[in-house]
Amino acid sequence: MEIRVYTFKNLRGVSSVRESVNFDLLGSPWIYTVQKDGWDNALLKSTVCLYKKKDFIIQSGEIIECLYYLKKGRIKTVAVSPSGQQKIMWYINASCIFGETPFFNQKPCDYNFVAVTDCEIHILSKDILFQEVIPKYPELVISLLTTMSLKIHILSTQVEDLAFNKPIIRVAKLLYQFYQGNNLKIKKGTAVIPITQEDIAGILGIHRVTVNQIIRYLKEIQALEDNTHLIIVKNIKKLQEVFSQLS
């Protein structure tokens, strides 16, 4: 039996992971790639699947026998209560892994994974992952662990916000993180945050009426533009002051 020992010096992805993580945005509900190097070669053994916007990629209750890599597009992870209420856990952007938790613990998946846009997804079977990918590209283990740690951090931050922060702080912080992460959509020359009040309520677990009241207040203090249908940041410093001074 061959035994291989990998130290941090052996794992080439460690430095690139550190360099690619934006620590100011840790805790925001968007999962970004932490390492692209190495995955292109690993994905040569994968199965490619295409999904349309709003398609279910993984449904709650499924047993996952493979690992998923989002090559193109964006998906969201959604928890659903027995009564049908939904809570958006996080969004996953291109060049990210997902489905690793139900894959490794071999228990039914707790969440739905839904395509927010058209997506190209690469699927790695258990045999290929353990027999070919990890032995040849051990640095990708760092990518897996970093992705899982980011999700743990998001969950712990959400618990902390629910316990200690008022709804206005949570909404302002979310919009600030969205803006700082360059998650913007250009409409008629204006940088718009492409998120609805319903999305905000779903992410933060706040009633939609409360979100509407907070958005109106942020417009009154001119942190946001006074626009009926779009969320446009007018003054990022004022937005930051809202959650900095009240927290």
Image (cartoon, rainbow, N blue to C red):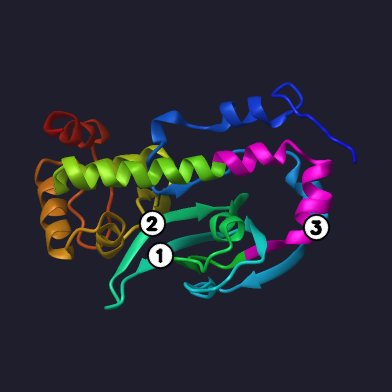
Q: Main secondary structure of the magenta part?
A: helix
For the point 76% across and 54% down, the residue is: 129
Task: Compare residues 123 and 126 and report the one nearer the observer.
Answer: 126
Numbered range of the magenta stretch: 120-146
Q: Is the Cβ of the residue at disc 1 closer than 8 Å to that at disc 2?
A: yes
In the image, taking residue 244 as reference, residue 153 lies left or right, namely: right
For marks 3 and 2, give the one nearer the viewer. 3
Task: Compare residues 144 and 180 and report the one nearer the observer.
Answer: 144
User: Which amino acid type is shown beneath numbered disc 2?
Assistant: Met
For residue 238, what is the image quadrant? Answer: top left
Q: Is the Cβ of the residue at disc 3 closer than 8 Å to that at disc 2?
A: no
Q: Is the Cβ of the residue at disc 3 closer than 8 Å to that at disc 1?
A: no
Percent x, y of residue 198: 26, 65
For marks 3 and 1, give the one nearer the viewer. 3
Q: Compute the Cα span from label 3 to label 2.
A: 29 Å
Percent x, y of residue 152: 43, 44
For the point 13% across and 44% down, the residue is: 166
Which residue lies under the disc numbered 3?
128
Percent x, y of residue 165: 17, 41
Circle 2: is it few (<14), some (14-19), or many (20+) Cα within 10 Å? Answer: many
Q: The C terminus is located in which quarter? A: top left
Q: Compute the Cα span from label 3 to label 1.
A: 28 Å
Which residue lies under the disc numbered 2?
89
For residue 105, what is the image quadrant? Answer: bottom right
Residue 33 covered by magenta stretch: no
User: Which amino acid type is shown beneath numbered disc 3?
Assistant: Ile
Which residue lies under the disc numbered 1?
78
For the point 39% across and 55% down, the residue is: 188
Q: Is residue 3 above or below residue 231?
A: above
Q: Compute the Cα span from label 1 to label 2.
A: 6 Å
